[in-house]
Amino acid sequence: MALSGPRLRACPVLWGLIEECKKQKMELLTEKKSVYAKISSIREDARQQKANTNYGKYGKGDRRRIRLNKESALRPAESQKMAIKRQVTELDQIITWLERFN
């Protein structure tokens, strides 16, 4: 449904709610991009560390330590990413619901 025309001007309060939800959604998407950048930098650091280890059984402990450190560093960022996705989905549902009345 388009957000223009005479029906839109009939309910300015509803229009304001829709615009506020869209603004929040854009802020969340910007935050999500920064979380993705943080995740990719953690993974890239782990790859670089792993490349500098010994191969075979001598580097096995080092690689395990690097993997465990990477997983522990990713855990908070992954949960934050999922929370943002959940909020964006909820905002999409709210926007769709509000647009039906507009």
Image (cartoon, rainbow, N blue to C red):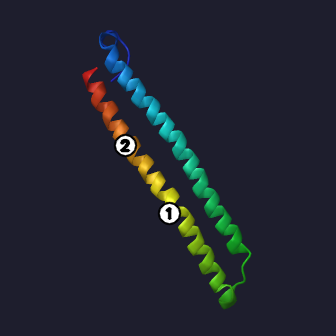
- The amino acid on which the numbered mark 2 sits, given as a three-letter code, is Thr
**For mark 2, does the 10 Å Cα neighbourhood hold few (<14), some (14 to 19), or many (20 or more) residues?**
few
Element type at marker 2?
A: helix
Disc with the residue nearer the chain's start (2 vs 1): 1
Residue 72 sits in quarter = bottom right
Element type at marker 1?
A: helix
Q: Is residue 49 above or below residue 12?
A: below
The quadrant in which the N terminus is found is: top left
Side of 47 relative to 19 (left or right):
right
Q: Is residue 4 above or below residue 59?
A: above
| Viewer-closest of 84 and 102 | 84
Q: Is residue 67 above or below residue 57?
A: above
Q: Name which residue lies at 34% across and 14% down.
A: 12
Q: Name which residue lies at 27% across and 31% down.
A: 97
Per the image, the residue denoted by label 2 is 89
Q: Position of residue 21 (x, y in %)?
A: 40, 30
Q: Name which residue lies at 37% across and 25% down.
A: 18
